[in-house]
């Protein structure tokens, strides 16, 4: 993944650092920057988060050109030599890269034949070493040799242009009053400009304060339309919360209001109507990570209402499954960022086979949104914490809206009732349980029906930010293997909000209890005292009709993961080894 930014103007160090902070969600293994002033490069590189780099960078108000990078390691270990920017052999050209160059080993061999050596192991450095001067023709020549995905920004010691190229990794340009910014995410432009240009795959060119030159993949010079920056959408402070994650969990309430309001509009209703009018005989829901779990919830909502084939699949496995897709297939791709490579790849596969492509995304300018025929935005506002919370809430809510619309039932009334009864759990109880969780090396989540899907998402949240091993399974599956692991060192968190399935789940609870396992119950139901005795603790949440419980139950469980991460001393916003936007397959 990685986040990149380029800048021309006054105060380059400060603005590059600000921008890096905004794209840090894309990776934070190491960070670096190069600024060119008076024909000389000043370079800084640090291992770890952008804050480590910021503590070393000497700010300078003077005009300069600069590029910067925050890395999520793919090729090559986390080290200073693998930290961007990388340099040409004569050290006159600096380059930052996001993406993966698939043929970099061959390219490196060709360089070696010319006695050009790389210092590190990255694919990106190989590209930097392929330049001996920086011009449109040298850029074009290098690009022709590359196979893979890239967003590049480059500068040379002698020029007043930043050079750029994009293929399958996001890249945007923007001109302010007296500055130029190029970045992986338009949020970097907020405060400096009111509009931006979105580059397409195959675009490349150069930009200075006075001049912008863009070519498309056919090497034709092109003009690109400027888009307005949506400032509200990009609002980004922590609003007094300690972390983005907790702020974003609480934002679910506003997100719900937003969805209810926005999906009353004629424009969005006409998109739902277009899906309704499409004569589909199969539905596919596809996503990764949390978005996949939202897809599972959508599958469950739709299956309960329609007697047709409905499948939800992890994006990275979609093409391996040989699903039959044709012009009667409704293919729904769920992605918060809209940039996840696995999801894009599955989308392209379905498109080729003639499926109707619908995107459920938070980013309307994203690749997935652009490739889809119909885009259903989730209006969750920018999500900064790596662990997705409000986006999951919004995706499930939107799938509820879609299901009800297709069935011809109102979604406003039930969602308003969710809004009035929304329950984020009791902080004291959640904090107490979070402390207990830290005593365990293994945690299991179990549930039946929709509660099993909630259990999967809750388990993912817990493991990704606390680093405690956690796994979710259907309550009934426990006895078919995993029960062998249960003893007094194991904690099982039981999600049980469906009255009809409760008694069976309690049988499984007894099986765990009699083997010494510890238990926490998450429920909205009345629990009699005999049953209560089985549990070390109970998280009680406000009851609602079954179809609304997935949105309600997850909120307390997201907070439970958050409080546990704090107990462990982890930064919940930036879990180790992960990144928010995963643009490699
Ligand atoms: C990464 C993130 C997850 C996210 C997944 C899918 O793994 O860390 O939080 O659920 O990507 O991302 P998307 O943007 O496609 O929803």
Image: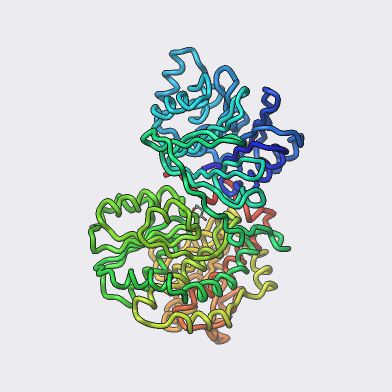
- The front one of 584 and 473 is 584
Give me the residue at 41% from left, 53% from top. Answer: 370
Q: Nearer the viewer, residue 147 or 323?
A: 147
Is 448 rendered above or below residue 94? below
Q: Position of residue 161 (x, y in %)?
A: 58, 31
**Residue at the spot 56% in from the left edge and 70% down from the top edge:** 255
- Position above or below: 116 against 368: above
Residue 195, percent across and down? 57, 51
Q: Is residue 69 above or below residue 543?
A: above
Give the quarter of the image for residue 177: top right
Residue depicted at x 60% and y 41%: 181
Location of the C terminus (image quadrant): top left
Could you tell whether 298 is left or right of 281 in the image?
right
Find residue 39 and report its horizontal and vertical position in percent. Answer: 67, 22
Q: Which residue is at the front of the view, 294 or 420? A: 420
- Residue 558: horizontal and vertical position, in percent? 58, 65
């Amino acid at each position: 993944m990685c986040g990149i930014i380029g800048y021309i103007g006054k105060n380059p160090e400060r603005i590059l650092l600000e921008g890096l902070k905004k794209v840090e969600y894309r990776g934070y293994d190491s960070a670096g920057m190069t600024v060119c002033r008076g024909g000389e490069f000043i370079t800084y590189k640090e291992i770890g988060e952008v804050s480590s780099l910021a503590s070393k960078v000497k700010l300078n108000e003077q005009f300069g050109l600069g590029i910067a990078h925050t890395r999520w390691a793919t090729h090559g270990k986390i080290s200073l030599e693998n930290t961007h920017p990388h340099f040409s052999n004569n050290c006159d050209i600096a380059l930052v890269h996001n993406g993966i160059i698939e043929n970099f080993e061959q390219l490196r061999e060709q360089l070696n034949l010319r006695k050009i050596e790389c210092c590190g192991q990255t694919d990106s450095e190989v590209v930097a070493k392929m330049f001996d001067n920086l011009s449109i023709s040298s850029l074009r020549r290098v690009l022709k040799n590359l196979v893979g995905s890239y967003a590049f920004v480059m500068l040379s010691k002698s020029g007043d242009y930043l050079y750029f190229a994009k293929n399958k990794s996001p890249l945007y340009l923007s001109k302010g009053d007296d500055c130029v910014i190029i970045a992986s995410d338009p949020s970097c432009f907020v405060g400096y400009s009111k509009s931006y240009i979105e580059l397409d795959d195959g675009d490349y060119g150069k930009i200075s304060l006075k001049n912008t030159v863009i070519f498309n993949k056919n090497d034709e010079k092109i003009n690109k339309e400027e888009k307005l920056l949506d400032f509200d959408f990009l609002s980004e402070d922590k609003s007094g919360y300690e972390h983005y994650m907790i702020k974003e969990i609480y934002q679910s309430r506003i997100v719900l209001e937003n969805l209810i309001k926005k999906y009353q509009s004629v424009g969005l209703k006409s998109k739902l109507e277009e899906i309704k009018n499409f004569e589909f005989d199969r539905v596919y829901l596809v996503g990764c990570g949390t978005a996949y779990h939202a897809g599972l919830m959508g599958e469950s909502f739709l299956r309960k209402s329609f007697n047709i084939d409905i499948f939800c699949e992890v994006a990275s496995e979609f093409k391996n499954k040989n699903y039959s897709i044709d012009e009667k297939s409704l293919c729904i791709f769920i992605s918060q960022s809209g940039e996840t490579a696995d999801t894009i790849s599955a989308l392209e596969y379905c498109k080729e086979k003639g499926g109707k492509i619908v995107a459920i995304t938070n980013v309307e300018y994203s690749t997935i949104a652009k490739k889809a025929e119909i885009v259903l935005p989730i209006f969750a506002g920018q999500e900064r914490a790596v662990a997705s919370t409000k986006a999951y809430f919004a995706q499930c809510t939107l799938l509820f809206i879609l299901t009800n619309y297709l069935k011809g039932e109102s979604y406003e009334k039930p969602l308003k009732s969710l809004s009035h009864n929304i329950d984020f759990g009791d902080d004291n109880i959640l904090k107490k349980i979070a402390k207990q969780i830290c005593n365990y090396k293994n945690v299991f989540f179990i549930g039946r029906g929709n509660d099993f899907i909630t259990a999967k998402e809750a388990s993912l949240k817990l493991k990704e930010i606390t680093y405690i091993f956690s796994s979710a399974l259907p309550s009934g599956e426990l006895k078919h293997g995993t029960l062998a692991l249960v003893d007094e060192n194991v904690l099982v968190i039981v999600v049980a909000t469906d009255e009809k399935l409760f008694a069976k789940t309690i049988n499984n609870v007894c099986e765990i209890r009699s083997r010494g396992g510890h238990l926490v119950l998450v429920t909205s139901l009345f629990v009699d005292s005999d049953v209560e005795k089985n549990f070390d603790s109970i998280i009680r949440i406000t009851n609602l009709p079954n179809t609304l419980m997935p949105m309600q139950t997850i909120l307390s469980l997201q907070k439970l993961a958050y409080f546990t991460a704090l107990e462990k001393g982890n930064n919940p916003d930036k879990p180790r080894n992960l990144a928010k936007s995963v643009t490699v397959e």
